[in-house]
Structure formats: structure tokens, C-alpha cells
């Protein structure tokens, strides 16, 4: 404020994933659990909402919950720990509030927090991971940034339904598509309102690819040659020789 400084901003995200009917189910489950709960969900490109083809939905949720239950919430300095506390208690309280509001509105919480010995109550940064079904886009947990260890999972009838829901967000940082069909991933990616499209991976940076967002996620870019250009100032020399 009060300066003539140029800025590039990467702000919030509500990164979605879509698991198509032709996806490798085990691969998708393993990587999406990690994508949702890595660093206790505190990643700008972490997965916060998942849409799954109806034919895979029950098996996906079963595997996702089983993998999540195997996480260990404990001291980050312990080699056995796979989930640490959140950085701030107020962040954990926000996730608690979003989760409770979703359950009041009809969502089902599939993880019993008491199974995680270090799980704390209000005012504590220690927060067990949570998986929600029965969610919809009237719920804050599916529309507003959570930035914590909670993820909502919805079934979808087809690609069109998935794309509509993935784009139904004020944010647009990354989106991931889980499919065996690369052509379909390209076609669907062109319809996604997001800065990065992943296929069969998520929560990942490649220095050769620009990092940018659309809508309320931000503006400008980092990484790649475009990132260098954003940090340099061009200077032109217009030279004419006179006979």
C-alpha cells in the first residue's frame, strides 16, 4: 500500500480431484489420501474435495477411509508419525467448525477422532484427519478453503457433472484428474478453471511448469521461464544507423 510495487499473489485454494471410472483405484486412493493429509492438509495445492465416478464410489470411500485410519497423529520428530499438529490452533478450530457444520447439515463423518490419541478439542492444534460423505456444495467445507486435514467426497454421474462441481469454486489453483485416458485428461483439463491440471498425481511442483492461479486464487506466476520474466524488467534499445 502506498507504493508503486508490482506484485504477484497466490492466495487461497480449494483444490478438487476427479476419479473417473477408468482410474487405477489403488493408485488413486494412495495418492489422494496423501494429497489431502500431507502436512496436516496445510498445502496450497492439497486436495480438499474429491468427486468419484458412481461405479467406483463405494470402493473408493472404503479404501480411502481404511488408509486414513492407518495414519499416526503424533510428535513430528517421531519416525512413526505420519500426521503432526496444525501450525495454529485457530486453523484447527476452523476445520472443526466446518466439519461440525457439515454434519449438522447432513454429512457423515467416517473417522472417529477418538481413535487418534493425540486428537485435541477446541483451542488445540492437534486434529485428527476427517473424511466426509453426504456432502454438497451448500456446505462451507466444499466451497470455502479449509487448509487442514478434512476432505469431502461426492459421487458424480459423468464427466460433465464432475467438471461443473470442480469449477464451482471461487478459487482455481490446481485440479487433478485420475484416469487411464490421456486424451480425456487433456480435453477435461481444457474445461477446468484452474492454473494447473494434474493427471494421476496431485500436490506436486515441477520447476519447468509455471505456478499460477485464476479467479480468487491470485494473479501473476512463479516457476518456469514465465516466473523469471515476472521478476525481471525489460529494457529496449531502438538503434538506427544514419548514413
Image (spheres, helix red, strand yellow):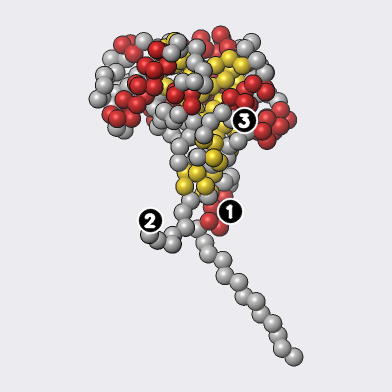
* Residue 212 at x, y percent in the picture: 54, 44
Rendering coords of residue 27 (x, y %): 57, 21
**For the residues marked 1 and 2, what is the alpha-carbon distance in whole angstroms?**
28 Å
Mark 2: few/some/many CA within 10 Å (<14, 14-19, 20+): few
Q: Left or right: where does residue 62 sit relative to residue 86?
A: right
Foreground residue among 216 and 205: 216
Is the N terminus in the top left, top right, bottom left or bottom right quadrant?
Answer: bottom left
Tag of residue 225: 1
Q: Say few, some or many: other residues with alpha carbon within 10 Å of mark 1 (under 14 / 14 to 19 / 20 or more).
A: few
Q: Are marks 1 and 2 in contact (CB under 8 Å)?
A: no
Residue lying at 59% horizontally and 30% vertically, measured from the top left: 167
Q: Earlier in the sequence, mark 3 or mark 1?
A: 3
* Residue 48 image offset from top left, x and y in percent: 48, 26
Give the crowd class for mark 3: few <14, some 14-19, many >=20 residues within 10 Å.
some
Point out which mark residue 1 bears. 2
Labels 3 and 1 touching (C-beta < 8 A):
no
| Residue at the image position 54 percent from the left and 40 percent from the top | 215
Q: Which residue is mark 3?
A: 199
Say which of marks 2 and 3 sits in front.
Answer: 2
Amino acid at each position: 500500500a502506498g507504493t508503486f510495487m508490482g506484485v504477484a499473489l497466490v492466495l487461497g485454494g480449494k483444490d478438487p480431484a476427479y476419479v473417473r471410472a477408468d482410474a487405477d483405484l489403488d493408485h488413486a486412493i494412495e495418492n489422494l489420501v496423501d494429497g489431502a493429509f500431507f502436512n496436516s492438509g496445510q498445502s496450497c495445492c492439497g486436495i480438499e474435495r474429491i468427486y468419484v465416478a458412481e461405479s467406483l464410489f463405494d470402493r473408493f470411500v472404503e479404501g480411502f477411509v481404511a488408509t486414513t485410519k492407518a495414519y499416526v497423529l503424533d510428535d513430528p520428530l517421531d519416525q512413526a508419525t505420519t500426521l503432526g499438529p496444525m501450525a495454529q490452533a485457530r486453523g484447527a478450530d476452523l476445520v472443526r467448525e466446518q466439519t461440525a457444520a457439515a454434519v449438522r447439515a447432513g454429512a457423515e463423518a467416517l473417522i472417529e477422532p477418538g481413535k487418534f490419541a493425540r486428537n485435541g478439542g477446541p483451542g488445540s492444534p492437534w486434529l485428527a484427519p476427517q473424511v466426509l460423505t453426504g456432502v454438497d456444495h451448500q456446505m462451507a467445507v466444499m466451497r470455502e478453503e479449509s487448509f487442514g486435514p478434512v476432505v469431502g467426497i461426492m459421487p458424480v454421474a459423468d464427466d460433465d457433472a464432475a467438471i461443473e462441481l470442480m469449477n464451482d469454486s471461487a478459487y482455481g489453483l490446481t485440479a487433478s484428474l485420475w484416469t487411464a485416458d490421456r486424451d480425456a485428461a487433456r480435453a477435461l483439463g481444457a474445461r477446468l478453471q484452474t492454473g494447473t491440471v494434474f493427471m494421476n498425481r496431485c500436490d506436486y511442483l515441477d520447476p519447468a511448469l509455471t505456478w499460477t492461479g485464476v479467479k480468487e486464487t491470485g494473479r501473476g506466476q512463479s516457476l518456469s521461464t514465465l516466473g523469471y520474466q515476472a521478476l525481471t524488467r525489460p529494457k529496449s534499445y531502438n538503434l538506427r544507423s544514419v548514413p
